[in-house]
Image (spheres, rainbow, N blue to C red):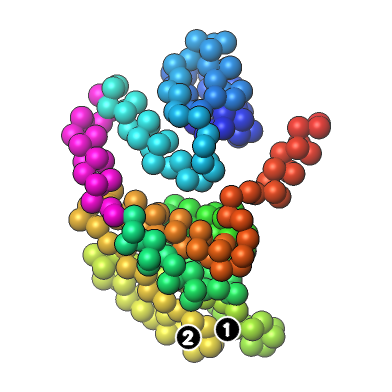
């Protein structure tokens, strides 16, 4: 799947799947992926035209994928009702206000996002959103992996003359996580704070996994949006990526 239909990695995966004669379904707004799908008679789920940045189309892409899996009896139809309920329960205003406050706290800092392993993709979504929307550097890692390496990196911050107040660690924490991981998070917070770096817990909330995923993703989107406004920049364009694509297209 590719929102624009022109993502290089997606087109490469399409060709590879075609060569292997694998069953395929494509998801896109159009672009080269739509043309290839028509050429090789591959079913295409065409979502509405690109009126928003691809990074904000997660809901549409996810819903299309779920419907495909339901149609092929890989998932039960009840998942669709569950998704609709999650959408109704997640009030955007609540997350917007929370994101606005968080953006002020991490303004002029490099955000470091830590999550439990099962939410590591959510951490990457936060990082990517901060990169693309707020146009800042951000770091993402997950427990317990980061305790085997990255935590050590904080011990020499002062020696390396890195301004510790320029770093803000955000630990996305599920209160129902395994007690061992929760303990690791608490100890890690103490270790990092000893080096003068601010650490903040962000609770992952929700009655089920779908709610936890989407509530946390929405919060990340709003945080990145308001952070862009704090920097007084347009959150929409991604000039560096567009320039990279133009240069690659010349080859």
Q: Position of residue 177 (x, y in %)?
A: 27, 64
In the image, residue 162 lies at what x, y percent? 66, 82
List the residue tagged with mark 2: 193
First to last magenta residue range = 73-91
- x and y percent of residue 179 in the render? 26, 71
Q: CA distance from mark 1 to mark 2?
A: 11 Å
Circle 1 SS class: helix
Q: In what quadrant of the picture does the C terminus appear?
A: top right
Callout 2: helix, strand or loop?
helix
- Up the image or down, 74 lies above or below 142; here it is above
Which badge, 1 or 2, is on the more N-terminal residue?
Answer: 1
Query: Where does label 1 land, which residue?
Result: 165
- Is 158 above or below relative to 14? below
Q: Residue at x 60, y 79 (%)?
A: 166
Q: Which mark is residue 2?
A: none
Q: Residue at x 44, y 28 (%)?
A: 47
Q: Are marks 1 and 2 in contact (CB under 8 Å)?
A: no
Q: Is residue 84 a member of the stretch shown in magenta?
A: yes
Question: Is residue 116 visible in the rendered structure shown here?
Answer: no
Residue at x-position 69% and y-position 85%: 161
* Residue 219 in view (yes/no): yes
Q: Is residue 140 above or below residue 76?
A: below
């Amino acid at each position: 799947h590719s929102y624009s239909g022109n993502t290089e990695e997606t087109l490469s995966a399409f060709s590879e799947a075609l060569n292997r004669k694998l069953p395929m379904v494509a998801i896109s707004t159009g672009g080269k992926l739509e043309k290839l799908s028509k050429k090789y008679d591959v079913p295409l789920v065409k979502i509405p035209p690109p009126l928003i940045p691809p990074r904000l189309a997660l809901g549409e892409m996810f819903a299309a994928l779920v419907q495909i899996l339901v149609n092929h009896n890989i998932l039960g139809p009840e998942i669709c009702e569950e998704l609709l309920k999650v959408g109704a329960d997640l009030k955007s205003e609540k997350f917007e206000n929370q994101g606005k406050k968080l953006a002020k706290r991490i303004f002029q800092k490099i955000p470091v996002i830590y999550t439990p392993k099962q939410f590591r993709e959510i951490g990457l979504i936060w990082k990517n959103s901060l990169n693309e929307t707020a146009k800042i550097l951000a770091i993402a890692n997950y427990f317990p992996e980061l305790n085997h390496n990255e935590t050590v990196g904080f011990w020499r911050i002062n020696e390396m003359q890195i301004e510790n107040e320029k770093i803000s660690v955000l630990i996305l924490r599920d209160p129902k996580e395994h007690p061992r991981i929760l303990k690791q998070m608490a100890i890690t917070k103490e270790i990092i704070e000893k080096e003068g770096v601010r650490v903040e817990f962000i609770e992952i909330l929700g009655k089920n996994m779908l709610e936890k995923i989407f509530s946390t993703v929405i919060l990340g989107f709003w945080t990145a949006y308001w952070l862009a406004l704090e920097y007084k920049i347009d959150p929409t364009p991604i000039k560096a990526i567009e320039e990279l694509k133009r240069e690659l297209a010349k080859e």
